[in-house]
Amino acid sequence: MLGYDLSRPPELSDGATVAVLLHGRGSHRGDLQALRPNLPDRWALITPQAPHPGHPWGYGPGWAWYRYIEEDRVMDASLSASLRQLDDFLRALPGILGIAPGRLVLGGFSQGGTMSMAYALTRPGTVHAALNFSGFLADTPIIEAEMMGPDATPIFWAHGTRDPNIPFALATRGRATLNRAGSSLTTTDHAIGHWIDPAGVSAAVDFVEAIAAR
C-alpha cells in the first residue's frame, strides 16, 4: 500500500471530512502536510506518496504519479497503475483512520492535481469533490468524454496565470473540455507561478463546504 503522512484532529469520529492530498512530480508524502493550517481543524488530512520513483524518469529523488510526455499527455500505463494503487489506498482509509469517513475530498498539486481529476472522473461517486491546484486535464483514452458530464464529480481548479511549468494555456484547454461536457467546474486564478496560493486553498474549502450545504 502507498506510504502516507496523517494529520488527525484530536477528536475524529465517524462522518468526518477527510482530505486526501497528492503531491507533485518529484516530491514526497510530507509535502502537502504544509497545507494543514489552511484547512478546517475538524478535517483529517492524509497525504499518500506516489508509487513511481522519480529518478529513472529524470524527476529527481522524489516520487511521481505518472510519466509525463508533453503538454497534457501522459504515459497511460503509469497513470493507470497509480489509479489502481489509489483505489486500494482509499478503500483502506477506514482502517487507517479508525473511523468511517464522511465526505472524502481528493486533491493535489501539479501531478497530484492531474491525478485527482483523473481519479474523480474515472471513478464516479468514489469521492465527493476533486481539488486541482495547477494540474492539467490529461488527454488520455483512460478519461472518456462521457465521464465528464453533469453527473461527474464536482471539480475545483485553481491555477497560476504565470505558471511556467504547467502553462495557463493548459488550464484554459482543460477547462474548456470540461465545460463543453457539462461538468460541474469551479475555477479561480492567481497571478503566481507554479505553487499554491493560500487564497486558492480557502476558496477550495468554501467550494467543499458549499457542496455539503447543497
Image (cartoon, grey):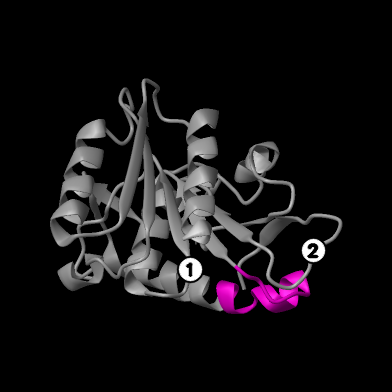
* Viewer-closest of 82 and 116: 116
Q: Quadrant of the N terminus?
A: bottom right
Is 66 magenta? The answer is no
The residue shown at (66%, 63%) is 3
Task: Give the residue number, with chain letter if any, for mark 2.
Answer: 12
- Residue type of the residue flagged with mark 2: Leu
- Percent x, y of residue 190: 38, 25
Residue range in magenta is 89-102
Work out whether mark 1 precedes mark 2 in sequence or the reverse, and give the earlier one: 2
Q: Quadrant location of residue 140?
A: bottom left
Q: Which residue is label 1 attached to?
A: 127
Residue at the image position 63 percent from the left and 61 percent from the top = 18
Q: Is residue 213 left or right of residue 58?
A: right
**194 up-or-down from 30: above or below:** above
- Between residue 53 and residue 72, name the one nearer to us: 72
Q: Is residue 144 left or right of residue 151?
A: left
- Using a 10 Å C-alpha cutoff, classify the residue at mark 2 as few (fewer than 14 neighbours), some (14 to 19) or many (20 or more): some
The answer to whether mark 1 and mark 2 are in CB contact below 8 A is: no
